[in-house]
Image (spheres, rainbow, N blue to C red):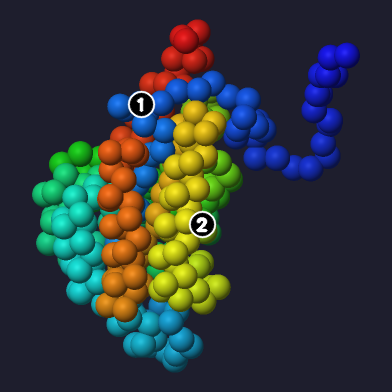
Amino acid sequence: QGSRPVRPMPSLLRTHGRFPYSAINARPRYAWPGGKRLAVYLGLNLEHFAFGEGHGGELAPSGRPDVLNYSWREYGNRVGAWRLLDEFEELRLPVSVLANSEIAGHCPELLAAHIARGDEVVGHGRTNAERQGDLVERDEAALIAETTSTLADAAGAPPRGWLGPWISQSHVSPDLLAEAGYEYLLDWCHDDQPTWMSTRGGGRILSLPYPQELNDIPTILVRRASASEFAGMIVDNFDEMREQSERHEQPLVMGIALHAYIVGQPFRLRKLRRALEHIAAHRDDVWLTTSGEIAAHARTELDRFVHGGV
C-alpha cells in the first residue's frame, strides 16, 4: 500500500505569513560553487553604544552612567576587533561585517580596514543602543534609510544584507527592507538553508541562516559557556554540518556570530583561534565566503528551480 498524502491541518494560531513549512529532506538539491555542500561565513558584529542610556550587553550589573559595561564594549572597537582582524588575515578568512552605521563615524579606520581587505558590509542599524522593533513604521523606515546611506558612503555601495540591532524586528521589517532595496536579511534562525520570505505588494526577500547557538552573546553572556566550550561548539558544529551536507547532498549554511568585545578578549581569542584554524584547514572541502555571496548564489539556484530548471 502506498502512503497516504499528508494534508496540512487548519490552525487557529496567528502566523507570520512569510513562508510555508518545508521539510529539509523534501527540497530541490543544488551545490555551492565548486560543487561544495557546506558554505561557512563569519558574522563579525561591530557596534557602538550610547553612553549612559539605551540598551547594551552587560558583563556585570553597574550604575548610571554605566561606565563598566560601556567601556567593556568599547574595548572591542579599540582592541578586540583589531586582534580579530589579524587572525582573519593570517587564516585568509573572509568576513561579513555587521556594522552599526555609527561605527562609520566613531571608528572609521576600523570599518575601512575591513573594506580594504574586501570584506562585506552588512547593515546592522544605527546603534545597538536601540531596538528596531520598538519603532513605529515611519521611524523604522527612517532608521533603515539612515543606516543604508551612511554605510553606502563609507563602503562605496549600499549594503545588500541586514541584521536588526538585537535581532529585533517589527511586523513590517521584512517589507521595509525589501522596499529599501535589501536582498537578504539575517534575523530569522529557522533553517540551515536560505529561504524566500514574502513581503507586501507581491515582493520577497531572502532569509539567510544566522546562528543563535554559535553566537557568543547567548552562549557566553547568557548561558555562561567558557571560551573552550564556545570554541568546541564551533568545531563540533562544523564537523557535523560538513558530514550532513555531504551525506544528504544538501547545500547547507553555517554562520558564526562574533562580537569583538567578547571573543576579542585575549583568553577567548586564544580558544577561538583553534576553532578557526580547524575550519581553515578544510578550505578545500567547504566554501569559505560571506553571507552576501551565499545569498547571491542561493538566489540564482532557487530561481532556477522556480522557473523549471533542473
Position of residue 140 relative to residue 191, above or below, is below
Tell which residue pokes out farthest to the right in this image: 1
- Residue 53 location (% of width, % of height): 41, 78
- Residue 8 location (% of width, % of height): 80, 28
User: Which mark identifies residue 212?
Assistant: 2
Residue at the location (84% across, 31% down)?
Answer: 10
Q: Are marks 2 and 1 in contact (CB under 8 Å)?
A: no
Number of residues whose C-alpha sits closer than 10 Å to that of mark 1, classed few (under 14), some (14–19) or many (20 or more): few
Position of residue 265 relative to residue 287, above or below, is below
Amino acid type of disc 1? Gly
- The foreground one among 191 and 52 is 191
Tell which residue pokes out farthest to the top in this image: 308
- The foreground one among 144 and 270 is 270
Residue 135 visible to an observer of this rendering: no
Amino acid type of disc 2? Gln
Horizontal side, residue 234 vs residue 9: left or right? left
Q: CA distance from mark 2 to mark 1?
A: 27 Å
Residue at the location (16% across, 44% down)?
Answer: 118
Where is mark 1, residue-wise? 35
- The foreground one among 244 and 128 is 244
- Residue 171 location (% of width, % of height): 58, 45
Q: Quadrant of residue 263?
A: bottom left
Q: Secondary structure at mark 2?
A: loop
Number of residues whose C-alpha sits closer than 10 Å to that of mark 2, classed few (under 14), some (14–19) or many (20 or more): some
- Quarter of the image where the N terminus is located: top right
Residue at the location (46% across, 86% down)?
Answer: 60
Residue at the location (20% across, 54% down)?
Answer: 91
- Residue 215 location (% of width, % of height): 45, 61
Horizontal side, residue 187 vs residue 145: left or right? right
Q: Secondary structure at mark 1?
A: helix
Q: Quadrant of residue 295?
A: top left
Tell which residue pokes out farthest to the bottom in this image: 63
